[in-house]
Image: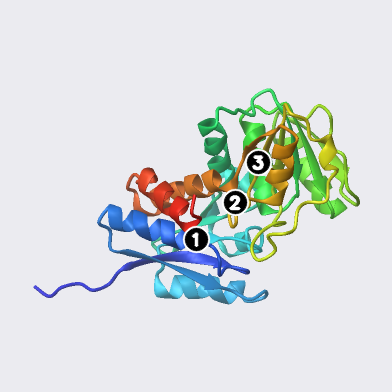
Amino acid sequence: MSKCYRSELVGTFGNPIDENPTGVVEEAAFAAKGLDWRYITMKVEPGDLGAAMAGMRAVGMRGLNLTIPFKVEGIKYLDKLSPAAEIIGAVNTVVNRDGELFGENTDGKGLLKSFADNGVSPKGKTLTILGAGGAARAISVECALAGAKKIYIANIIKDQGEELVRLINERTDAEAEFIFWDHAIAIPEDTDILSNATSVGLYPNVNDKPNIDYDTIKPNFVVSDVIFNDPRTLFLAEAKKRGAKTINGLGMLVNQAALNFQIWTGVEAPIDVMTDVLRKEFNL
């Protein structure tokens, strides 16, 4: 009998993408489970996503991650969405099921698991979310579905932020309110959890931080950041100076990576292996 040399292929489309460590994490998980799968990281130029998605179908890739800036745009190239992804209106995970592309969103679920790992729950809490893009939509909707009482959405683009507020108010039990982010905004005093869901601080712009009034962060706040490269963001450093509990983006990254692994392969993810690899990548 001849030997089969074909590996199953998954990967990610994004821009920027060079410093995304997801491939290292997923490859380590495949090796730990003895799976002949490969993960490739691909930079896709703006305007080329349709061609890239057609290429995914053509070569029979088993799955994809969609990252900045394709989480919302990617939906129009898919055949079906999970109920959560449909509400969120953004996708970060794609599964190829015999030529049918199914979209899921594991960003918010990954953050909720990271919260739980740190003894934090959004149930009955008031959240302030910075941003209204793909990550912000996932986080705010998942937290609303998990029982958050109120969610403030702060965004520079008014229409985008107001649309997310309407979505939360109409499709969940949480109350949502828009904050026009056109200056160094004060964080509402009734905030329990503050989350940066923008790309501000992502490599190579590690010296950037969201434009807020940091003196309005209180010691009772839980402050999280979706940025994972580098996870030691200035945003979290400023929050820590003011006594807040901080949660970096690594937990969200490894938890959503584990969910992706299980969705693609049907095998339980070796999350300890994935966490160890990620910590080594960032010398933690």
The part of the image, by quadrant, that contains residue 63 is bottom left
* Residue holding disc 3: 224
* Residue holding disc 1: 21
Mark closer to the observer (1, 2): 2
Q: Nearer the viewer, residue 173 or 227?
A: 227
Instruction: Tell me the tag on residue 134.
Output: none
Visible residue check, residue 170: yes
Q: Residue at x 84, y 53 (%)?
A: 156
N-terminal label among 3 and 2:
3
N-terminal label among 1 and 2:
1
Q: Residue at x 64, y 29 (%)?
A: 122
Tell me which amino acid carries mark 3: Ser
Residue situated furthest left in the rendering: 1
Q: How far apart in space, not on screen, are marks 3 and 2 (Cα)? A: 10 Å
- Residue density around tag 2, few if under 14, some if 14–19, many if 20 or more, within 10 Å: many
Residue situated furthest right in the rendering: 183
Q: How far apart in space, not on screen, are marks 1 and 3 (Cα)? A: 19 Å
Estimate the x, y position of residue 255 in percent, counting from the top left.
48, 44
Estimate the x, y position of residue 150 in percent, counting from the top left.
76, 29
Residue situated furthest top in the rendering: 124
Q: Residue at x 48, y 62 (%)?
A: 64
* Residue holding disc 2: 231
Side of 58 relative to 196 (left or right): left
